[in-house]
Image: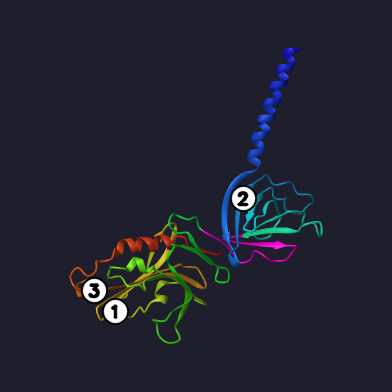
Amino acid sequence: MRKNWLIISALIIVAAGTWYVVARRASQLIASAFYACNGGKTISAEFYKGESKSVSAPGEPPTPGGSVNIKLSDGRVMALKQTISADGGRYSNGNPLIQGNESFVFWSKGNGALVLENNEPKNYTGCIEVAPDPGGLPQIYENGSKGFSIRYPAGYSLNDNYQYQELGPGRDIGGVSFTIPASVAEGTNLGRDSYLSVEEIPQVKYCSADLFLDSGAPGAFKPAAVTDNGITYSVASSTGAGAGNRYEETVYAVPGTNPCVAVRYFIHYGVIENYPAGAVKEFNKQALLEEFDVIRRTLIIQQ
């Protein structure tokens, strides 16, 4: 009898272990994301994959078995089940087939997200995914209407009303700029007005870097395809000079975007030979370009 009980106990343990493995597989973490929303609000989300349920009636799609755990910046934490959706991932705290049964819905699509509370988009709108901090980029810029987010270092000056005006009357390009801290240029020949910007040109047929530069000016280079961090950019550059100053610009446009989105590096510096000996030191151009590269790689465009 004792032998039989040991066998039965062993079978129960094996069965329990098997169930535990199945349960873990049925709720597998597949992705995590951090979203910045309008008004400085944020959402942290962990997405889990689960087994889809069989159709309840002919012609109906299977009910998704996924789920999401979210943490809102107002302190609320929720676990939501995935529901049927024609577009994106839809998660709710109730049964969408029963009227009035849902009070909270989290909807993710591409790099964006939306929260509905009692069927209204009230508190969390314009949410865009934010890249993880690669180190040294604690600040987050998010613009729901323009549809992008980007990280930048502490000390950079933000201009949300930036306009690039070097192409002539009627050709201004709007966007947002991040100007280097004065401390970076202090004691060097680097201009304090050097910056990185994210710009947009609406209603374009092709998104190319030459749209953002005077391609006919001396020192301008034709755009070339450059792949970096898994993204293929259209890249063009130009150089200018005047009164002992040098101006270097490089534009990374993202083909396929409309409005056409691009990141501009603008570097202004004085000719080092024009300074009295020992008055300033030459700025580290390579280090500045590398920092701009790190910032650019955190750009996420809403799809």
Task: Locate residue 100 relative to residue 137 in the image: left or right.
Answer: right
Q: Which residue is nearer to you in this view: 184 or 238?
A: 184
Q: Nearer the viewer, mark 2 or mark 3?
A: 3
| Quadrant (top left/top right/bottom left/bottom right) for the N terminus | top right
Label 3 environment density (alpha carbons within 10 Å; few <14, some 14–19, many ≥20): some
- Tell me which corner region of the image, top left, top right, bottom left or bottom right, holds residue 84: bottom right
Locate residue 293, reporting x and y percent.
39, 61
* Residue numbers of the magenta segment: 109-130
| Quadrant (top left/top right/bottom left/bottom right) for the C terminus | bottom right
Q: Nearer the viewer, mark 2 or mark 1?
A: 2
Task: Locate residue 262 relative to residue 145 in the image: left or right.
Answer: left
List the single residue furthest toward the right: 99
Task: Specify which label sits upstream in the sequence, 2 or 3.
Answer: 2
**The disc labelled 1 sits on which kind of residue?**
Pro
**Distance of mark 1 from mark 3, alpha carbons?**
18 Å
Residue on which the image places disc 1: 218
Task: Locate residue 76 relative to residue 151 in the image: left or right.
Answer: right
**Residue at the spot 61% in from the left edge and 53% down from the top edge:** 45
Q: Secondary structure at mark 1?
A: loop
Return the mark for residue 47. 2
Q: Is residue 223 visible?
A: no
Image position of 25 with respect to 239: above or below: above
**The disc labelled 3 sits on which kind of residue?**
Val
Locate residue 116, reporting x and y percent.
70, 62
Residue on which the image places disc 3: 271
**The disc labelled 2 sits on which kind of residue?**
Phe
- Look at the image and say whether residue 121 sits in the magenta stretch: yes
**Distance of mark 2 from mark 3, alpha carbons?**
53 Å
Q: Are marks 2 and 1 in contact (CB under 8 Å)?
A: no
List the single residue furthest toward the bottom: 169
**Residue at the spot 29% in from the left edge and 63% down from the top edge:** 284
Q: Secondary structure at mark 2?
A: strand
